[in-house]
Amino acid sequence: MLKGERLAFIWELTVKGDRITKIRVLYDGANPLVDEARLIREYQNKFKRHVLVPTEFPFKVTRFNGYIDGDESLMLVYRSDELNRFFRVDRGGTGTVQREGRYVLYVE
């Protein structure tokens, strides 16, 4: 249950005649990882590098934040509002192992 919050969806529709032929989700307020997918795609297209992202988390992800730096750095932050916790993945420009707490992730 959402505690008085609004839920937003932004879709891009392609229409031919009187029919919708394609629906592209630009924003899904119910799924915080939609922004993650967009950011990863942008990073991969810009730097031509593959990124491995977490598929399981130690909590339910309620928010996602991330950004790309010009030096090929990528930061992904997965948050849980319920537990007041976060899980962060840093992808430095060197392609080395990044350590965050007890988790070790390799991003090539």
Image: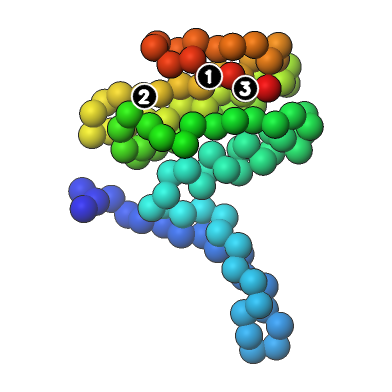
Scheme of image coloration:
rainbow
Q: How many marks?
A: 3
Mark 3 is on which residue type?
Val
Can see residue 92?
A: yes
Which is more N-terminal, label 2 or label 1?
Answer: 2
Q: Which residue is mark 3?
A: 107
Whether the residues at callouts 1 and 3 have beta carbons within 8 Å, the answer is yes
The front one of 62 and 60 is: 60
Q: Mark 2, residues whose alpha carbon is within 10 Å: few (<14), some, or many (≥20)? A: some
Q: Which residue is mark 1?
A: 105
Residue 30 as seen in the image, left or right of residue 40: left
Q: Quadrant of residue 11?
A: bottom right
Examine the rendered structure and indicate whether residue 31 appears above or below residue 65: below
Q: Which residue is mark 2?
A: 86
x and y, in percent, of residue 30 in the image: 38, 53
Instruction: Find the distance from the CA under tag 2 to the CA under tag 3.
Output: 19 Å
Which is more N-terminal, label 3 or label 2?
Answer: 2
The quarter of the picture where the C terminus appears is top right
Mark 1 is on which residue type?
Leu
Mark 2 is on which residue type?
Phe
Foreground: disc 2 or disc 3: 3
